[in-house]
Image: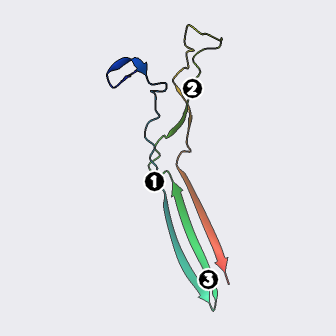
Amino acid sequence: MRAIHGRTNRWLSNPATLPRQTTVDLRASRRFGLGGRVYVDGMVEAFNVFNRTNFTEINNIFGTSAYPTQALPTFGQFTQAGAPRQVQLAVRLGF
């Protein structure tokens, strides 16, 4: 725990924070005319392009009893992460 303003009798109640989250998404599309008013759009989309792990949850349960004296082995560990890299292709027909 950290002291606030140099005073040791006041403590932060939640000093733990998640790491910074960063994600880069990309979309590319191209329209192809088929004659008249008919066209086809081709698309490719990529999510989390650099495949960075973005943690979204930490186990914040210290113990199992009302007044635990020892921390659980998983206390403070990451328990969930965002989606990994995903790529999708799409075709859209317009008329």
**Mark 2 vs 1, N-terminal side:** 1
Q: Nearer the viewer, residue 11 or 23?
A: 11
Position of 2 compared to 54: left or right?
Answer: left
Q: Residue at x 59, y 21 (%)?
A: 61
Q: Nearer the viewer, mark 2 or mark 1?
A: 2
Q: Residue at x 43, y 21 (%)?
A: 11
Q: CA distance from mark 3 to mark 1?
A: 29 Å
Q: Rate crowding at label 2 as few (under 14), some (14 to 19) or many (20 or more) other CA atoms within 10 Å.
A: few
Q: Which residue is mark 3?
A: 39
Q: Which residue is mark 2?
A: 59
What's under tag 2, amino acid-wise?
Asn
Q: Nearer the viewer, residue 75 or 2?
A: 2
Percent position of residue 37, x then y = 64, 89
Percent position of residue 92, x then y = 64, 73
Q: Which residue is mark 1?
A: 24
SS of the residue under disc 3: strand
SS of the residue under disc 1: loop
Q: Quadrant of the C terminus?
A: bottom right
Q: Is residue 35 above or below residue 78?
A: below
Q: Is residue 77 above or below residue 66?
A: below
What's under tag 3, amino acid-wise?
Tyr
Q: Is residue 8 above or below residue 40?
A: above
**Mark 3 vs 1, N-terminal side:** 1
Q: Residue at x 58, y 85 (%)?
A: 33
Q: CA distance from mark 2 to mark 3?
A: 51 Å
Percent position of residue 50, x then y = 44, 49
What's under tag 1, amino acid-wise?
Val
Q: How is the image coloured?
A: rainbow
Q: CA distance from mark 2 to mark 1?
A: 27 Å
Q: Residue at x 56, y 81 (%)?
A: 32
